[in-house]
Amino acid sequence: MGGLASIVLTIAAGCGGGGGSTSDTTGNTGGSTAMGTLRVALTDNPACGYDNVWVTVEKVRVHRDGSAGEGDAGWVDIPLPQAQPVLAPQPLRVDLLTLTNGTLVPLGQVQLPAGAYNQMRLVLAANSAGNPYANAITPTGGSMVPLTTPSAQRSGLKMNVGITVPAGQEVDFAIDFDACKSIVKAGKSGKILLKPVLTVLPILSLAGQRVQGWLDPSLATAGAMVSVQAQGVIVRATPPMIDSGGNLKFELYPVPVGSYDLVVTARGYATAIVTEVPAHADVSTTVNSIAFAILPPVSDRQTVGGTITFGASSVDTGGRVRALQRLTGGPTIEVASANAGHDDGRYAMALPLGAPVTAPYLTGTAPLRFTPDIGMSGTYLLSASVARSTEVQTQEIVLGNAPVEQDFTFAAAP
């Protein structure tokens, strides 16, 4: 399942100066330039199969020019928050998997000139002899191992964005760091690589853009994941948590304003979908009540796997396979996904054999009326892609008594 991490950016435009070194893309500083304040925080939804995903953040940078290089003038650095005055900013080590259900950790703030910013970079500290686990991962039931991070980490993980900071106003964005999809295993070497998958979401208010509800407590130990999706693409995802009353609650935040399919998956259960769930700008959406907690039907699972090849090689393809279901009458949802191994191109996932169940969203406290989609029992559309190609390959499969092996081969560009 997709696990999402987010850097939440608050760009509060206002007057005043100070707060770090700033310049525009020409290198000019402006004493009379209208200024805004950029605040940064970190949140996450957990990756699959891991107890911890540690990253150490050195800083976040923004630039007006989407094609600006590391050494170009015009970068605005956002210093990390400090518990006490220090001579230089200290890196911040965060376990992404502790930041669930809308939890945020501040990453700092800076004043900057109002206007458009088209590039952002997240700079991670390097693993070193003195700090070998700056970026690390703990597999469930295993010991902590270092994460091999991209060679580009010193210049920052690049994100093309479209942020406008109006003078005297506030605008907010969230950058989703999808932890599950960003972790790639190298089966032969035993290494685990971090290849970040990042997207940008707007934040309009603290009160709105929240989708919440309850699952049956029996799902607490089944690796349950709740996501909101648009046309089969996961927008936000989180595991449920035990609340103060002992109930299994989920809260998704921030969710861009719109209408979504809420998808619940868990080991040993069929997939449950609530359609047309709204996300509002200024109020939260409650999908169901504690009295009518969501409990999908029990279901066996079957394994799907294969190899992704790019050209003549299955090494470092950046391959990924998504398991989709086209529900009768719509919508299409993502049930699971898997990255291809770094050095062997292998992917694998386990999918429910049972029929997915769907229910329309209802306002108020009425129980959701789930209906099984019998025709889609064990039927999936595998959607495969590789990092160095825009091609997407699809293959429909029907699960049965035996595991399914489905390979994908992409032609390398001449």
Image: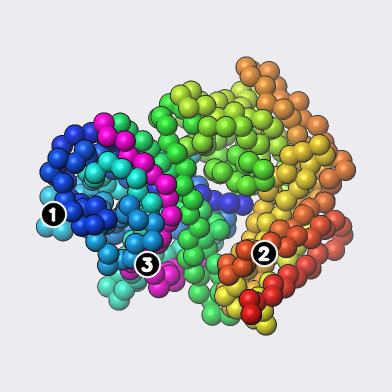
Amino acid at pointer 2 = Glu
**What element does badge 3 sit on?**
helix
Cβ–Cβ below 8 Å for labels 2 and 1?
A: no
Image position of 214 (left or right of 281): right
Residue 394: x percent and y percent? Answer: 75, 60
Question: If you read the primary sequence from the N terminus, does the residue marked by circle 2 or circle 3 appear first?
Answer: 3
Image position of 232 (left or right of 82): right
**What element does badge 1 sit on?**
loop
User: How has the structure been colored for display?
Assistant: rainbow
At x 75%, y 34%, the residue is 358
Residue 367: x percent and y percent? Answer: 70, 22
Q: Nearer the viewer, mark 2 or mark 3?
A: 2
Question: If you read the primary sequence from the N terminus, does the residue marked by circle 3 or circle 1 appear first?
Answer: 1
Q: Nearer the viewer, residue 155 or 294?
A: 155
Q: Is residue 314 above or below residue 44?
A: below
- The dot on residue 132 is none
Image position of 324 (left or right of 44): right
Amino acid at pointer 3 = Gln
Q: Which residue is mark 3?
A: 153
Image position of 145 (left or right of 31): right
Asked where in the image residue 272 lies, by quadrant, the reply is: top right
Residue 239: x percent and y percent? Answer: 55, 43
Badge 1, how many Cα within 10 Å: few under 14, some, many 20+? few
Q: Which residue is mark 2?
A: 391
Q: Which residues are magenta?
A: 142-168
- State the residue lying farthest toward the bottom: 312
Q: Nearer the viewer, mark 2 or mark 1?
A: 2
Residue 14: within the magenta? no
At x 72%, y 73%, the residue is 409
